[in-house]
Image (tube, rainbow, N blue to C red):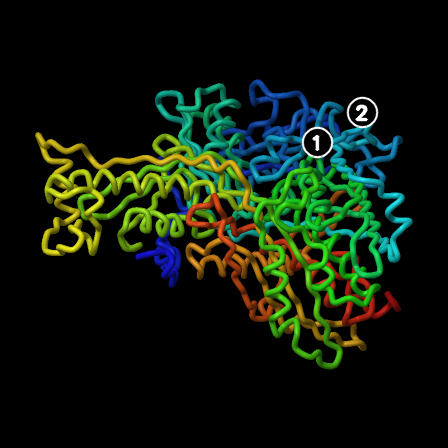
Amino acid sequence: MSVSARTGRRRQEGAEKVSGATRFTADLELPGLLHVHLVLAHAASARIRRIDTTAARAAADVVGVLTGADLPNLETAAPELPLARERVFYAGQPIAAVVAKTEAAAVDAAMLVEVDFDEASPVIDPIAAMRDESPAVLEENESASEEDASIHGASAAADQEPADRPRNVTGVAHLTRGDVDAALKQADVVVKGTYSIRGAHHSFMEPHVSVVRPEPDGGLTVWSPTQGPFVVRDDVAALAGLPPHKVRVVPMPVGGGFGGKVEFLEPLLALIALRLRRPVRLALARSHEFVYGRPAPAARFEIELGARRDGTLLALRVRFHYDNGATAGWHAGLTANFLGGTYRIPNFDLRGFEVATNKTPVDAYRAPGATQAYFALEVAMDELAASLEIDPIELRLRNVSREGDLAADGSEWPRIASVEVLEKARELSVYSAPLGSDEAVGVALGAWGGARTPSSAGCRVDPDGTVSVTVGSPDISGTATGLALIAAEAFGVAPEMVRVEVADTATAPFGATSSGSQVTYSVGGAVYEAAREARRQLLEIATEELEAAPEDLDIVDGKVTVKGAPNRAVEITQLVKLSTDFMGRYKPIQASGRSAVQAASPMFTVHVARVRFDRETGAFQLIGYAAIQDVGRAINPPEVEGQIHGGAVQALGRALGEELVYDADGQLRTASFLDYELPAADQIPNIDVQLVEVPSPVGPLGAKGVGEPPAIPGTAALANAVSRAAGVRIREAPINRSQLVTADGR
């Protein structure tokens, strides 16, 4: 079956999941398994005077209580330590781990641990954090991590970084081109404003959970719903002082990841398991997940955007910062590239600051740095369109970057579908249909560059004729089914005859981390190559059996046939048997494939939101929504559409109410689903997904990444729709409903 005749395929693991047969990490039961519960700091900034574990150690069924002092070879004080030493940097930082025979016993004993703090005033507001008189949040040598950024397809780099940074700023992204001051003076219209978007939590159904077992040879086996098993292997090995081959990571089914499950609990559990010589499990309670899990950062943008009266963009100045909590952060470099490269802007000055505060450290959340960048940029673009009285899609079409234009970093854009997605959006009725009373439409553009990592795959043919593909990249979004379709086309069999398995790090070929929209893009080429090589090996055997040249052979309905002579055929199962017979003369069918994609295939998307506004109450209803996305080539269209549905809802959630709110003491006030406002089903209309296919010249079968783009423009699209309906310019996400009835004008 050719992918060109695509009708889609159900997920290969779907039946197991819907029937409840899938075993997640929390379902594992090992002999002698112990349970871990964490004691979290209640203070946001403090010195640890004393940790008294006496009562907890004496509690029933408690096997041990560990503090930072019990863990070897670690730094003195840092927020990223598995357990705090000397200092705590945020409320929710782990300071002790109670290990017991049952989960209930561990929870009860954790309440008996007494901690004395010498508390200090926390640094909560990122603007205040940059003042000279502000206390230092981190050690002076903390800086933005290029390695952390690269895992998610991002970059922490900048073309210019000042030698003297403001207080608590761990990194600066600074990109410039042309003369912004002069260009703004020449502009007929300048939009100037401050735009902000709150931090958000991943809110995955499955909280963080991991199991680690010490092995008799001194090594470790780790079971984890990780997006990056090789990252976990290498980091755990380095921390534990073990060679990588002594750490076996078994990737388990992921109950939602969105960038937040690359690595988290595994290093701490590895140290505990080695110390106690027993298998241990830690499953975070939902309350711990909110205060300890790594959320998406909040961001604030000060923008000046200038244009001629005909809509031609002239200049963009942006000063922005990320509130990274108690970590160095890495989003700003990626954000600067989006701000300066999406449109043809001849003059720009973009300066982004990574700011540390005494809050939970942040990390990647679906489309890191892009949702924030495009919220600010696309709201400003909508303001500009309104000021110039130009159709908002027309304004974007006049300015959007095209193939050959310069990106913000000076490189040239490859073939992109920026124009195609905008033109498709303009055709849709959700955008063009006449507006009813108190209705309005908002639109926003988004883009994602896409990560890429060298990857490999294995392929064999089993005795029943099944083509088995082995990869090392976890399936978090149906990617295994897509890879099966790629292998089916490469080998020449029906998709149902292909099975993709994600193996553990002891047996899997190296694979990319499942993040940054890169699995199909990075691993798909390796799968295609492996399947083609397996096909070649099969036909090599058939050549002798059928006495025909390889180019005269074809695979049809589980047989290798001679073209033009269908009666001359041999079953695939027979050929496999010949390659495994005792004293046989044919080599086994066992192939491998490798891929190292050198070029990115950026993805563009447009979201359109239609709302109805109640002027008396300030309430609004989302009554229509469309998501248009360039996917290169949709390998499995139903799954692609599902990815877009999910990402769109996550983007809308950040406009409708999702936010992390901290008080002046650094306490998270939205630390449960009672306070953290996830969108409900009645707030989301049917989402019209439109796939635009401009094939990638380097992606497997023309495919591009899919996962990140859907989560990018929806926040701005909804804010723009509400702004136009209410006559009140929305520059904050989530949308402040009280502003809609108290403010007047734009």
> Can the viewer see residue 356?
no
The type of residue carrying mark 2 is Ala
Instruction: Tell me the residue that label 2 is attached to.
Output: 163
Residue 394 percent location from the top left of the image = 71, 64
Residue 41 percent location from the top left of the image = 68, 36
Q: Label 2 crowding class (10 Å Cα cut-off): few <14, some 14-19, many 20+? A: few
In the displayed structure, 680 sits above or below 339; it is below
**Residue at the image position 42 percent from the left and 29 percent from the top:** 278
**Residue at the image position 12 percent from the left and 45 percent from the top:** 574
Residue 529, quarter of the rendered image: top left
Residue 420 percent location from the top left of the image = 59, 60
- Using the image as rendered, state which of residue 82 and residue 501 is in the foreground: 501
Which of the two discs, 1 and 2, labels the residue nearer the N terminus?
1
Quadrant location of the N terminus? bottom left
The type of residue carrying mark 1 is Val
Say whether residue 10 is left or right of residue 697: left
- Using the image as rendered, state which of residue 674 and residue 546 is in the foreground: 546
The CA span between labels 1 and 2 is 29 Å
Quadrant location of the C terminus? bottom right
Q: Label 1 crowding class (10 Å Cα cut-off): few <14, some 14-19, many 20+? A: many
Give the structural element (helix, strand or loop) at label 1: strand
Instruction: Tell me the residue that label 1 is attached to.
Output: 88
Give the structural element (helix, strand or loop) at label 2: loop
Specify the farthest residue to the bottom.
437
**Residue at the image position 73 percent from the left and 32 percent from the top:** 159
